[in-house]
């Protein structure tokens, strides 16, 4: 069986090869061919354009993550199944909790080092800091990531509000409501966590009005997709201190292969002192890769054995 693994995930080819054994050929590629048929029984990538999909001859398109917004699903050929994989909820939940604790502990207000000269004044003038316990966390999206965040935030004594499409009650949350009522709970939200899929219903979900409804002391954490938040509105709210802080791990522009310079946004977020900016690393751990590729290898074995696929999200019939 020919398995092609594309782009940023190509370096994982040796890992997958070891899991699959000698009966399968695992071929890493920097990018998909620009012309002609794209042939592979299994293609592992998180980006397929409509033009590429039209040339695809593939039984399984295995997305090596959860998001499907980079796949032109409607253009896939007949007989091409699409599966995704999770396993990122553990490190992403830890990232969110780090952002919360960094916010309440206010570590940036403390000296960066304690030596003989700075210690007496630092000890004498040490400021009070906050506590996570008793604060309200609102999670937009309550799937794998949202639930993992909620369980850890509960351990800190935080109150959990889950915002989902339908707002059905959930025992993992103190309160649940539909996304149409999100603005109702923003005035009581201390930490707003975005961990929802990006689609036309969530694009620009957080704009000027939503940011204006938040507490001035609030923290916004985005581990979903950048476009869930209006770019200009977010920059203005942070610059003008209309919200206290943000931790942003997802961006509005990503460098293309070979691109030496690429700003992550149209706005100079890097100049803001109340922003924790990270380069899309919240889920990027060795443990994530191990868990994901064990899952992917098993799904390929299921395909080879004619068994139902796990996490089947689309089948172009």
Image (cartoon, rainbow, N blue to C red):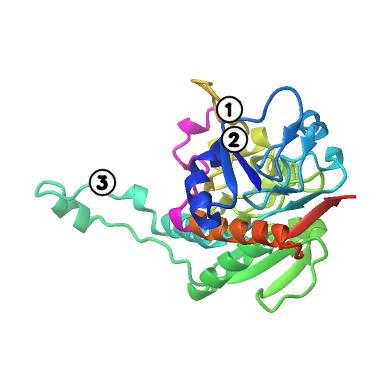
Report the side of 277 relative to 160 (left or right).
left
Q: Are marks 3 and 2 in contact (CB under 8 Å)?
A: no
Q: Nearer the viewer, residue 246 or 129?
A: 246
Q: Is residue 189 visible?
A: no
The crowding category of the residue bearing disc 3, from other C-alpha atoms within 10 Å (few below 14, some 14 to 19, many at least 20), is: few
Among the 4 quarters of the image, the one containing residue 306: bottom right
Residue tagged 2? 235
Which disc is residue 98 wearing? none
Counting from the top left corner in percent of width and height, residue 141 is at 70, 59
Label 3: which secondary element: loop
Mark earlier in primary sequence (1, 2)? 2
Residue tagged 3? 112
Q: Which residues are magenta?
A: 266-288
The Cα–Cα distance between marks 3 and 2, rounded to whole angstroms, is: 27 Å
Which disc is residue 267 wearing? 1
The Cα–Cα distance between marks 3 and 1, rounded to whole angstroms, is: 28 Å
Mark earlier in primary sequence (3, 2)? 3
Magenta stretch: dominant SS?
A: loop
Among the 4 quarters of the image, the one containing residue 264: top right
The crowding category of the residue bearing disc 1, from other C-alpha atoms within 10 Å (few below 14, some 14 to 19, many at least 20), is: some
Counting from the top left corner in percent of width and height, residue 234 is at 62, 39
């Amino acid at each position: 069986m020919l398995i092609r693994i594309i782009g940023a995930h190509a370096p994982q080819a040796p890992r997958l090869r070891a899991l699959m054994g000698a009966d399968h050929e695992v071929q890493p590629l920097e990018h998909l061919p620009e012309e002609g048929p794209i042939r592979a029984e299994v293609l592992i990538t998180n980006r397929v354009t409509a033009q590429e999909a039209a040339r695809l001859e593939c039984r399984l398109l295995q997305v090596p993550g959860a998001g499907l917004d980079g796949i032109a699903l409607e253009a896939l050929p007949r007989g091409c199944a699409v599966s995704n994989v999770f396993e990122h909820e553990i490190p992403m939940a830890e990232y969110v909790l780090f952002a919360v604790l960094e916010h309440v502990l206010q570590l940036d207000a403390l000296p960066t080092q304690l030596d003989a000269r700075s210690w007496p004044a630092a000890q004498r003038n040490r400021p009070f800091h906050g506590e996570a316990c008793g604060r309200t966390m609102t999670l937009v999206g309550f799937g794998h990531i949202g639930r993992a965040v909620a369980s850890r935030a509960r351990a800190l004594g935080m109150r959990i509000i889950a915002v989902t499409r339908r707002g059905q009650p959930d025992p993992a949350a103190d309160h649940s409501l539909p996304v149409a009522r999100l603005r109702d709970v923003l005035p009581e939200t201390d930490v707003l966590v975005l961990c929802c899929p990006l689609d036309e219903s969530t694009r620009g979900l957080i704009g000027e009005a939503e940011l204006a409804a938040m507490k001035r002391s609030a923290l916004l954490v985005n581990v979903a997709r950048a476009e869930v938040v209006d770019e200009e509105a977010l920059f203005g709210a942070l610059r003008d201190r209309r919200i206290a802080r943000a931790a942003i791990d997802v961006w509005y522009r990503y460098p293309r292969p070979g691109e030496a310079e690429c700003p992550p946004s149209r706005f100079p977020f890097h100049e803001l002192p109340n922003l924790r900016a990270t380069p899309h690393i919240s889920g990027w751990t060795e443990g994530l890769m191990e868990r994901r590729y064990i899952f992917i290898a098993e799904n390929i074995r299921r395909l080879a054995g004619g068994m139902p696929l796990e996490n089947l999200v689309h089948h172009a019939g």
